[in-house]
C-alpha cells in the first residue's frame, strides 16, 4: 500500500475551497508530529531576528504549502519563496494564497533543489520531509550553503534510518513509496551538512516511542483503511473520536521527551 496516492487524493478533496484548504492545513498541523517539532524550531529561530528585519525564507519543497502558510501568518517580517518540482501543487498553493491575501508575502516557483537557480540570499531555509526523496542530497546541501545568508539557519526534517519510511517487516516495500532512501542516520546527516559548510546547531531524533505510536494510530491505520476503500472517509470522524485525544497526548510527550532514538530526525544548521 502506498501512502502518497492517498495523500494526493486528500489534497485534491480539501483544496476545492479556501475553507477546506484552511481546515486541511489545521489538520496536518494537528495530526502530524513533524509539524509540532518544526513549528517549535521556527518560532525559536524567528525569535533571534530583529522584529523590524525582513526575514527571507526559502521553503525548499513546499508541497501543499502548509509551512509557508504558517510562516506568512505567524511572522509578519517573513518574505517567503516557496519552491517545488510539482507544478500542480504550486498552482494550487498560489491560488489559495492569493485568495487568502498572502500573495504579497509569498512567491511560488518551480525549482529543482539539485540545480537551484535562485540567487538568494535567505535568512532561513526550511526543508520538511524532502531530502528522503532526493538521491543527490549533497548537491542540495551545497546549494543551501550557497544561497544562505551568513548567520542564517537551515532546518532539515526527514525520516531516520530507524524505520522512518516504515518499511514493512515482511518485505523491502516502504509504506511511503516515493522515498529514494529509507532515512538518515543522525550522524550521517550532520556530516553531510558539515561537508557542505553548514555547522550543526541542533540535532535530535523525533518520533520516539510516543511519537511512533501516535503515527500508527493517527496516520498509518487510517491511511490503510482509506487505501482499501474511499468509503472509510465517511467513518473516519467516528474513528478519531476516541483516538485523537490519545494521539495528541502522545505527540505532546514526544515533543517534551529527549528521544535517544526515533524514526524521524530534525537538524538545525547555520552558516
Image (tube, helix red, strand yellow):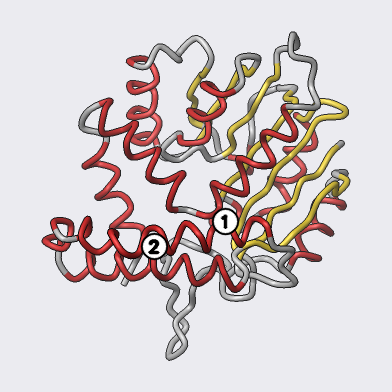
Left or right? Give the position of 143 relative to 248. right
Q: Is residue 174 above or below residue 89?
A: below
Residue carrying label 2: 218
Quarter where residue 2 is shown = bottom left
Q: Position of residue 98 (x, y in %)?
A: 37, 15
Q: CA distance from mark 1 to mark 2?
A: 13 Å
Q: Which mark is residue 252?
A: 1
Graded by Cα atoms within 10 Å as few (under 14), some (14 to 19) or many (20 or more), the crowding at tag 1 reads some
Q: Position of residue 151 (x, y in %)?
A: 87, 29
Mark before the other along the chain sequence, 1 or 2: 2
Q: Residue at x 78, y 35 (%)?
A: 153
Quarter where residue 16 is shown = top left
Quarter where residue 223 is shown = bottom left
Q: Position of residue 240 (x, y in %)?
A: 29, 60
Q: Quadrant of the C terminus?
A: top right
Q: Position of residue 259 (x, y in %)?
A: 71, 67
Q: Residue at x 77, y 43 (%)?
A: 142
Q: Is residue 67 above or below residue 269?
A: above
Left or right? Give the position of 240 relative to 194. left
**Closer-to-camera residue (136/44):** 44
Q: Is residue 109 above or below residue 129?
A: above
Q: Quadrant of the N terminus?
A: bottom left
Q: Secondary structure at mark 2?
A: helix
Amino acid at each position: 500500500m502506498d501512502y502518497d496516492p492517498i495523500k494526493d487524493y486528500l489534497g485534491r478533496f480539501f483544496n476545492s475551497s479556501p475553507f477546506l484548504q484552511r481546515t486541511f492545513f489545521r489538520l496536518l498541523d494537528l495530526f502530524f508530529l513533524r509539524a509540532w517539532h518544526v513549528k517549535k524550531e521556527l518560532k525559536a529561530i524567528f525569535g533571534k531576528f530583529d522584529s523590524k528585519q525582513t526575514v527571507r525564507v526559502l521553503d525548499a519543497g513546499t508541497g501543499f504549502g502548509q509551512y509557508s502558510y504558517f510562516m506568512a501568518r505567524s511572522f509578519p517580517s517573513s518574505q517567503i519563496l516557496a519552491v517545488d518540482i510539482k507544478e500542480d501543487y504550486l498552482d494550487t498553493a498560489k491560488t489559495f494564497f492569493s485568495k487568502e491575501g498572502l500573495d504579497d508575502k509569498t512567491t511560488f516557483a518551480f525549482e529543482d533543489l539539485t540545480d537551484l537557480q535562485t540567487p538568494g540570499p535567505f535568512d532561513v531555509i526550511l526543508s520538511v520531509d524532502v531530502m528522503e526523496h532526493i538521491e543527490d542530497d549533497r548537491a542540495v546541501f551545497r546549494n543551501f550553503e550557497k544561497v544562505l545568508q551568513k548567520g542564517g539557519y537551515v532546518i532539515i526534517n526527514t525520516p531516520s534510518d530507524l524505520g522512518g519510511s516504515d518499511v514493512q517487516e515482511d518485505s523491502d516495500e516502504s509504506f511511503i513509496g516515493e522515498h529514494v532512501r529509507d532515512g538518515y542516520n543522525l550522524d550521517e546527516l550532520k556530516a553531510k551538512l558539515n561537508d557542505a559548510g553548514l555547522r550543526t546547531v541542533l540535532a535530535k531524533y523525533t518520533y520516539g516511542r510516543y511519537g511512533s505510536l501516535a503515527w500508527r494510530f493517527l496516520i498509518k491505520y487510517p491511511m490503510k483503511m482509506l487505501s482499501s476503500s474511499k468509503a472509510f472517509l465517511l467513518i473516519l470522524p467516528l474513528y478519531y473520536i476516541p483516538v485523537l485525544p490519545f494521539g495528541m497526548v502522545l505527540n505532546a510527550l514526544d515533543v517534551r521527551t529527549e528521544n535517544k532514538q526515533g524514526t524521524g530526525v530534525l537538524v538545525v544548521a547555520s552558516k
